[in-house]
């Protein structure tokens, strides 16, 4: 089973992806925890190219190609081999992030993202947890751990609000795999909710 986590910056994806991977491992499953952009040596190199430096460094089109190239390598080297071996893959962000962050930049780009996805990736997670949170809370949390990968976190509140609405729209677009989780609770409460939903999905397979 392929599980992804999505949401705006600071929503708690990394925290929850780690907690779910730990809980599923403790329950006896073989779990591969990974992230995007990155998750394979080549994709981690592309990560540095897209997340560091001048915000104007790449055009939206070049950026879509870079994220998709990273995803293709990640899929070939990490995700597909793990799924073939019967493991559970828990991934912090996947293609829905490109649909939002690159696809919402300008009219027409979402179609480009979807077309490239169809050509080069062609797979969706089985289950996607959207951790939903007020942008104010997300920005406040994200600033607490600010480092050098801040090209996208400098976006500001208004854009984060559009992203939040966009992610909720994606959840309506793909209702079979999306589960929307209220992220404005203690991490343990959020994690309990997510584990229950993941176990139900595993039991139903
Ligand atoms: P994301 O991966 O979505 O950007 P993180 O998991 O890195 O989010 O969390 C961002 C910051 O907020 C971290 O410092 C983390 O410890 C903190 N955090 C995560 N979940 C919660 C929560 N439920 N309540 C309060 N703080 C949280
Ligand atoms: P991430 O490390 O998950 O940051 P955070 O923990 O702050 O959510 O992702 C880094 C940034 O990369 C994030 O701002 C969103 C952006 N991103 C895209 O723009 N497109 C993509 O396809 C992916 C996977 C991430």
Image (spheres, rainbow, N blue to C red):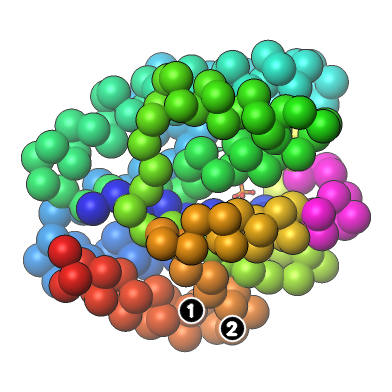
For the residue carrying disc 1, how many other residues have a C-alpha within 10 Å: few (<14), some (14-19), or many (20+)?
some
- Verify CB contact (< 8 Å) between mark 2 and mark 1: yes
Quarter where residue 64 is shown: top right
Label 2 residue near ligand 1, CB within 8 Å: yes
Please tell me which residue is depicted at 61% across the width and 28% down the height of the picture. Answer: 113
Note whether 52 is above or below 174 in the view shown. Answer: above
Q: Which mark identifies residue 179?
A: none
Report the residue at 81% width, 54% height from top.
162
**To which residue does mark 2 refer?**
185
SS majority, magenta = helix
In the picture, measured across the screen, residue 184 lies left or right of residue 77, that is: right
At x 47% / y 68%, what residue is drawn? 179
Task: Give the residues in magenta.
Answer: 153-162
In the displayed structure, 86 sits above or below 53; it is: below
Q: Point out the quarter of the image occupied by ligand 2.
A: top right
Instruction: Evaluate whether residue 2 shows in this view.
Output: yes
Instruction: Name the residue beneath numbered marker 1.
Output: 190
Tell me the distance, in whole angstroms, between the alpha carbons under discs 2 and 1: 6 Å
Mark 1: is the Cβ under 8 angstroms from ligand 1? yes
Dot 2 or dot 1, earlier in sequence: 2
Helix, strand or loop at mark 2: loop
Q: Is residue 20 above or below residue 151?
A: below
Q: Residue 124: horizontal and vertical position, in percent?
A: 39, 43
Instruction: Locate residue 176, reporting x and y percent.
Output: 41, 62
């Amino acid at each position: 089973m392929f599980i992804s986590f999505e949401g705006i910056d600071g929503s708690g994806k990394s925290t929850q992806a780690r907690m779910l991977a730990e809980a599923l491992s403790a329950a006896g499953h073989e779990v591969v925890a990974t992230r995007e952009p990155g998750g394979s040596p080549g994709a981690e190199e592309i990560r540095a190219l897209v997340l560091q430096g001048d915000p104007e460094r790449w055009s939206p089109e070049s950026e879509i190609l870079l994220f998709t190239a990273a995803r293709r390598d990640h899929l070939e080297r990490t995700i597909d081999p793990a799924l073939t071996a019967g493991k559970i893959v828990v991934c912090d962000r996947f293609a829905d992030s490109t649909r939002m962050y690159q696809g919402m930049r300008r009219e027409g780009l979402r179609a480009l993202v979807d077309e490239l996805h169809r050509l080069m990736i062609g797979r969706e997670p089985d289950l996607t947890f959207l951790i939903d949170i007020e942008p104010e809370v997300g920005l406040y949390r994200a600033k607490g751990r600010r480092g050098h990968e801040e090209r996208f976190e400098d976006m500001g509140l208004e854009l984060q609000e559009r992203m939040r609405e966009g992610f909720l729209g994606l959840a309506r677009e793909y209702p079979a795999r999306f589960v929307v989780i209220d992220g404005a609770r203690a991490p343990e409460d959020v994690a309990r909710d997510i584990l229950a939903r993941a176990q139900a999905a595993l039991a139903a397979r």
